Image (tube, helix red, strand yellow):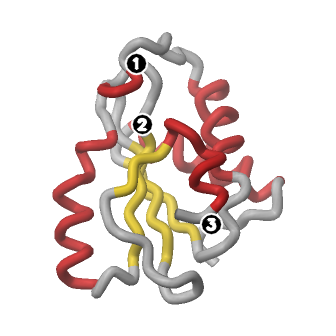
């Protein structure tokens, strides 16, 4: 686990092992509204089987879901995007790709815009 993963705290759940830095891409998955990180567990299994662990799958875990269920929900998408950006802004050790399902796609877009302001450009 790289240092930025530790700094991300409870925001990220890893579903595939990390390969050596520089030999993998980090796929950050954003669940749909009401969803949780485990939604992407089957996708992570498929990618691990096909990609020889060159894609590290990490899923965002929203407050109020699963192991974070005791935390209050964040009802404002802008605030949620700000908080996730804070967790991801140090993710420069491997290419970063954001993928979201439904509301997660909108959230991924907002996070990508904010990350760009921190010099972390997803998809490059």
Q: Earlier in the sequence, mark 2 or mark 3?
A: 2
48 vs 98, left or right, is: left
**For numbered disc 2, what is the local secondary structure?**
loop
> Disc 1 marks which residue?
64
User: In terms of sequence position, does the residue under pointer 3 or pointer 1 come before the other?
Assistant: 1
Give the answer, above or below, for where 61 lies relative to 51: above
Residue under the image location 31 percent in, 35 percent down = 36
Q: Residue at x 58, y 18 (%)?
A: 76
Residue 93 pos. (x, y %): 66, 73
Q: Please say if the residues under marks 3 and 1 sit with CB atoms less than 8 Å apart.
A: no
Residue 120, given in percent of the width and then of the height, sits at 74, 63
| Label 2 – label 3 distance at C-alpha | 19 Å
Q: CA distance from mark 2 to mark 1?
A: 9 Å
x and y percentages locating residue 103 in the rendered image: 41, 36
Please identify, in this view, whether the residue under mark 2 or under mark 3 is nearer the observer: 2
Residue depth check, mark 3 versus mark 1: number of the one nearer the observer: 1
Graded by Cα atoms within 10 Å as few (under 14), some (14 to 19) or many (20 or more), the crowding at tag 1 reads some
In-front residue for pair 3/87: 3
* Dot 2 and dot 3 residues touching (CB under 8 Å): no
Is disc 3 placed on a helix, strand or loop? Answer: loop
User: Residue 72, relative to residue 21: is it above or below?
Assistant: above
CA gap between label 3 and label 1 equals 27 Å
How crowded pointer 2 is (Cα within 10 Å; few <14, some 14-19, many 20+) is rated as many
Identify the residue under disc 3. 122
| Residue 70 location, quadrant | top left
- Compared to residue 64, the image places residue 60 above or below, namely below
Q: Is residue 119 depicted above or below 74 in this figure?
A: below
Report the residue marked by disc 2. Answer: 61
Q: Residues within 10 Å of mark 3 (few under 14, many from 20)?
A: some
Residue 101 image point, x, y percent = 34, 46
């Amino acid at each position: 686990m790289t240092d930025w993963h530790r700094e991300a705290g409870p925001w990220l759940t890893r579903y595939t092992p990390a390969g050596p830095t520089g030999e993998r891409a980090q796929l950050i998955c954003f669940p749909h509204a009401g969803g949780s990180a485990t939604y992407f567990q089957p996708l992570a299994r498929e990618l691990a089987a096909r990609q020889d662990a060159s894609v590290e799958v990490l899923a965002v875990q929203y407050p109020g879901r699963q192991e974070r269920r005791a935390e209050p929900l964040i009802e404002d998408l802008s605030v949620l995007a700000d908080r996730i950006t804070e967790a991801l802004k140090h993710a420069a050790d491997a290419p970063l790709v954001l993928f979201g399902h439904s509301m997660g796609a909108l959230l991924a877009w907002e996070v990508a815009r904010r990350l760009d302001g921190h010099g972390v450009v997803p998809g490059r």
